[in-house]
Amino acid sequence: MRAGIEILAGLAILANAVVYGTDVFCALVLCPAVAAVDDRALTQVMGHVHRLADRRIAAISIGGLIVTAATTALAAANGHWVSTAAGALATFALITFAVVYTRVSKPVNTALTAAALANRVPDDARQLQAHWDSVINARVALQTVALAALCVGLAAA
């Protein structure tokens, strides 16, 4: 069963690393770059980025959470307590990430996507983006905790 834990942990790390890398890129590059453009460019770029990310990255994120929970359950079932604790921490961080995404990021994504597809600029485009930006560091921190915990769990398996 050790091999099963290692395989699942490896898959969880890979899936969550995609989300982590995407959010780090947004925090370090995309958000500051979008702050320097006009509202029409902001709406078009971020609306279409969110349209694609919500379809493509969301599936990877959900898969990462599922595999993380499965890793934790398998570790617990086989008495690998360090891996179980690390997996539980990772699962908690990813559930918290999902709550932040669902409550803050997703409504902004939906609004900017709709505006971009309608080729209009919302009056509150800048405020929408600022609201999205307000949680990007928390999202990165949660993904960092999850990935670090998964690495600990993998090493302890």
Image (cartoon, rainbow, N blue to C red):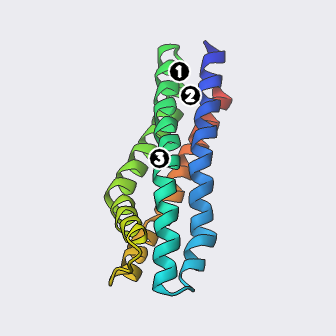
Q: Is residue 48 above or below residue 16?
A: below
Closer to us: 142 or 27: 27
Number of numbered discs: 3
Tell me if mark 3 has few (under 14), some (14-19) or many (20+) residues whose alpha carbon lies within 10 angstroms of its own: some
Amino acid type for the residue under numbered disc 3: Ala
- Which image quadrant: the C terminus? top right
Residue 75's disc number: 1
Residue 85 seen from this side? no
Going 51% across and 30% down the picture, which residue do you hit? 67
Find out whether the residues at labels 1 and 2 contact each other: C-beta distance under 8 Å.
yes
Give the SS element for disc 3: helix
Q: In which quadrant of the rendered view does residue 2 lie?
A: top right
Question: How far apart are the alpha carbons under marks 2 and 3?
Answer: 26 Å
Residue 83's disc number: 2
Left or right, 48 with reference to 123? right
Closer to us: 2 or 43: 43
Residue 63 seen from this side? yes
Give the SS element for disc 2: helix
Give the SS element for disc 1: helix
| Residue at the spot of label 3 | 58
Q: Is residue 42 above or below residue 136?
A: below
Going 56% across and 59% down the picture, which residue do you hit? 23
Q: Earlier in the sequence, mark 1 or mark 3?
A: 3
Q: Earlier in the sequence, mark 2 or mark 3?
A: 3
Amino acid type for the residue under numbered disc 2: Ser
Question: How far apart are the alpha carbons under marks 1 and 3?
Answer: 26 Å
